[in-house]
Amino acid sequence: MIAQLFASQHLSRTFSPTSIMSGTGNPALFPPQPEAMAAMISRGPSPSEDLEGYLDHRVASSKILASPDYPTPEATVRAQFLGELARRLMKMPSEVGILG
């Protein structure tokens, strides 16, 4: 719900909000799959220290969280994460050395 509220109030600052595993908090509902939970809370390498490792980690997590019925080619997923990182770095000049 927070992402939806932010997007509705700050459209110019919102690129692509994604709600993952949102729910009501009802403990009677099924819990997340252990693999999905592990993918969401695991921390991969820092892109400033290991860009390839960072991208590998993000791609692997994406494979776990994405729909198996609509697979996206790994090269496409990798390019999306690299683009996401580039957009983030445009806002954080102190880390600009990562991509080049």
Image: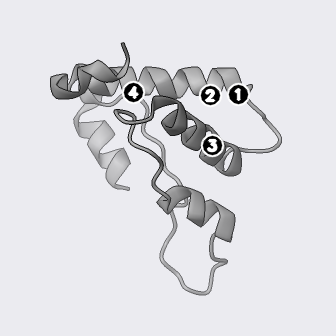
In this picture the colour scheme is: one colour
Of the two numbered discs 2 and 4 on the same chain, state the one appearing first in sequence.
Answer: 2
Query: Label 4 belongs to which residue?
Result: 85
Image position, residue 96 (x, y; %): 25, 20
Query: Label 2 belongs to which residue?
Result: 77
Rendering quarter of residue 33: bottom right
Query: Label 3 belongs to which residue?
Result: 62
Q: Residue furthest top?
A: 100
Query: Label 1 belongs to which residue?
Result: 74
* CB within 8 Å, label 4 to label 1: no
Residue at position x 25%, y 28% in the image? 13
Given the image, on which type of amino acid does mark 3 rest?
Ser
Of the two numbered discs 3 and 4 on the same chain, state the one appearing first in sequence.
Answer: 3
Element carrying mark 3 = helix
Of the two numbered discs 3 and 1 on the same chain, state the one appearing first in sequence.
Answer: 3
Q: Give the quadrant of the N terminus.
A: bottom left
Residue at position x 30%, y 38% in the image? 8
Given the image, on which type of amino acid does mark 4 rest?
Leu
The answer to whether residue 25 is above or below residue 92 is: below
Rounded to the nearest angstrom, the CA distance separating label 3 from label 1 is: 9 Å
Image position, residue 55 (x, y; %): 54, 33
Q: Is residue 96 toward the left or the right of residue 45 in the image?
A: left
* CB within 8 Å, label 2 to label 1: yes
Rounded to the nearest angstrom, the CA distance separating label 3 from label 4 is: 15 Å
Residue at position x 50%, y 59% in the image? 42
* CB within 8 Å, label 2 to label 4: no
